Image (spheres, rainbow, N blue to C red):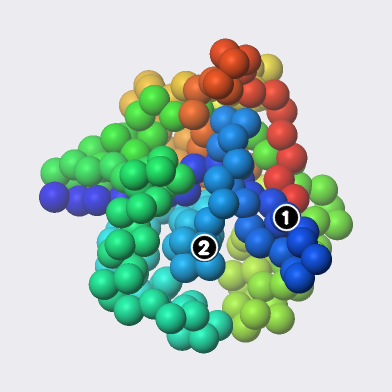
Amino acid sequence: MVTYYAAMGKYRLEQFDVGSRPVVLIAGNEYGVTIPEYILWNALLWNILNYDALRTDCLQKARRFHIPMAEADFDQTLERLLFRGLIRKGQGFTGAAALQELFREVCLVPVRLFPWQKAKGFFRLLLAGYPLRVARHIFGPDRLSNEEKALLNTLLVCPALSFSPPQLLPAAANLYLKRIVVLERGEYPNGEHFGYIRHDI
């Protein structure tokens, strides 16, 4: 059985007198998260990872930032985020089936990164020790296939598209991995649909 994970929503940093804390925003709701929860959620933002890759990434980041996180803590954190709906899980007998389950009945919502935000994110990755080619791949010019352009144009007209057609799966996954859309629930609690959103890096 193949299992993939991805993050739902976006985030912002909430300011306090003693500092700031991350808050995950999904469908108009705010969800406070602990530092271990944020490490795991952030590892999946614009990433699609299996269990082993996610665990390795999170445990390495926890050691790097001196955050206590044993393997048992990781499993508990993962289950909490799944229960709260802050991350999604897709399973299937093949990778394609797991990916299709991951994107089933979620909304693809376009995000807009302004040039100064891309530059800030680019240099932040370099300062964090990421290779130049990785930073360029993430924050470089968007190179979209015809299918990706068509899907993105549809999203810009209808800002929240509930994804289901399997033929659009590669384009949908690529838009997510290229940091052009985030995954959201279909509606706000009051029934209103999503509007066009901007993600602040």
Mark 1 nearby-residue class (10 Å; few <14, some 14–19, many ≥20): few
Q: Secondary structure at mark 2?
A: loop
In the figure, residue 15 lies in which quadrant?
bottom right
Toward the right, the furthest residue is 116
Q: Position of residue 26 (x, y in %)?
A: 56, 37
The residue nearer to you, when weighing 133 against 26, is 26
Q: Is residue 62 above or below residue 79?
A: below
**Label 2 sits on what residue type?**
Thr
The residue nearer to you, when weighing 88 against 118, is 88
Residue under numbered circle 2: 34
Distance of mark 1 from mark 2, alpha carbons?
13 Å
| Residue 8 visible in this rendered orientation of the protein | yes
Q: Residue at x 30, y 54 (%)?
A: 79
Q: Position of residue 199 (x, y in %)?
A: 71, 45
Q: Is residue 62 above or below residue 163?
A: below
Image position of 129 (left or right of 89): right
Q: Position of residue 96 (x, y in %)?
A: 27, 41
Residue under numbered circle 1: 14
**Label 1 sits on what residue type?**
Glu
